Amino acid sequence: MEVREHLRICLEALTVHKLRSFLTTLGIILGVASVIAMLSIGEGAKREALAKFKQLGVNNIIVRDKKLSELELEEARAKFSKGLSREDAQAILTVVPSVEQVAPQAELEVEATIEDRTAKVTVVGVTPEMFRILNYELQSGDLISREQYDNEKRICLLGADVARDLFSSRDPLGKMVKLDDQWFEVIGVMGSRSLYTETVGELAARNLNRDVYLPLTSFLRRFSKEDVLASEIDQLTIRVGDSDRLVETGAVIRRILDRKHYGNRDFEIVIPYELLRQKEKETRIYNLVLGSIAAISLLVGGIGIMNIMLASVLERTREIGIRRALGARRREIMSQFVTEAVGLSLVGGTIGVVLGVAISIGVGNIGKFGAVVSPFHVILAFFVSALVGIASGTFPARRAANIDPIEALRYE
């Protein structure tokens, strides 16, 4: 009965001054919304980053051909550097004991045609090892085999978007696709991938779903790059056996390539694991900053509630005196005002949770990643709201409980 009475009085106090109650809870609303949005957006962004780096391979080192100006490229070739080549891949595999596999690849943007449909695609010449190193998944068909690679077969695998654009709902397996002026048989369709939809480290933005994969041997025989000074290949993907030796192995690879390229830095090395650690560090700093802002908002909200509760104690001094004269104990008076303060906080917390979830979903949609709203985050927000209410309501409640009944009855 006592609890029900406190809740009834609390509800009346909140509804009598609706605007004042809303303005009082504004700090709590913003603070809780910030906490929810911060945790949800941060977790969503973290999972998105982890997914990207995992697809790059946390045990991998990637060597990319560096884009140089025409003058820099001529100087590099004049100094006997041929750019990245299959010889580099073989040298790394032979010399570095911690390297398990090396997969070279070459790329070229072309136009794919089938009947009356065309699509801009990136043709990628690969070795069979690349699919295992990067954990590529097939939607249908088969991957490139060692026999097809050695025999320079005119076969290809289509990225998910390319297959949809060229064949719509039809089955592309066994069909012929024209890439520039060359015909290739489709032996498989790759599963959808989200990697490279934005820049990852030094790796330029690219949608892998618009790639068409060929055996590297077929690519080098049948396609030629417009720039005669261009490197033979565009990328080396290197699988390292021990992730603890990634940085050390990267340094060894750099020395090998420096020597083979005669000191010309016409390549760049990316270690996804190091990028992941840097990303996690940036995320921690980001969370710390947002957490500080949320804490300040909650502190301001708590101060606002305390001020309003002190004003409420002053306004209701005569009411307190009457209740004390009728036998209400100090504990009951204190419980009443703490309940009102907690009620204000929980109302603000509820609105803050709704606002925080809405902000999280909106930012996630704009940033093209899924914000993760955890039930734990919601429970934490309500717990913090209640804690702020108790902390900010205790002092005014104690003050109300300590008012002398006689003085309270005389108060005008």
Image (tube, rainbow, N blue to C red):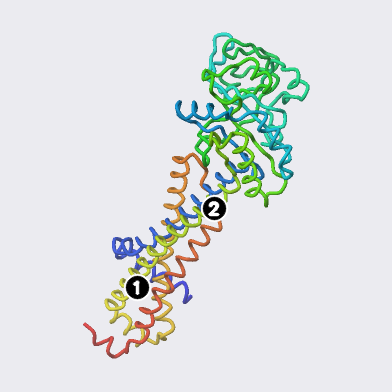
Which of the pair 272/171 is nearer the observer? 272
User: Can you give x and y, in whole percent of width and height, for residue 91 in the image?
Assistant: 70, 35
Report the amino acid beneath label 1.
Answer: Met
- Which residue is depicted at the point 54% across and 19% down? 228
The residue tagged 1 is 306
Q: Residue furthest left?
A: 412
The residue tagged 2 is 280
Give the answer, above or below, for where 337 lies relative to 137: below
Q: Is residue 64 visible to us here?
A: yes
Q: Is residue 347 visible to us here?
A: no
User: Can you give x and y, in whole percent of width and height, for residue 149 in the image?
Assistant: 73, 22
- Which residue is depicted at the point 41% across and 80% down? 334
199 with respect to 307 (left or right)? right
Q: Residue furthest front?
A: 79
- Which residue is depicted at the point 70% across and 15% down? 174
Give the answer, above or below, for where 61 lies relative to 66: below
Name the quadrant of the C terminus: bottom left
Report the amino acid beneath label 2.
Answer: Glu
Mark 2: few/some/many CA within 10 Å (<14, 14-19, 20+): some
- Which residue is depicted at the point 37% across and 84% down? 401
Which of the pair 105/334 is nearer the observer? 105
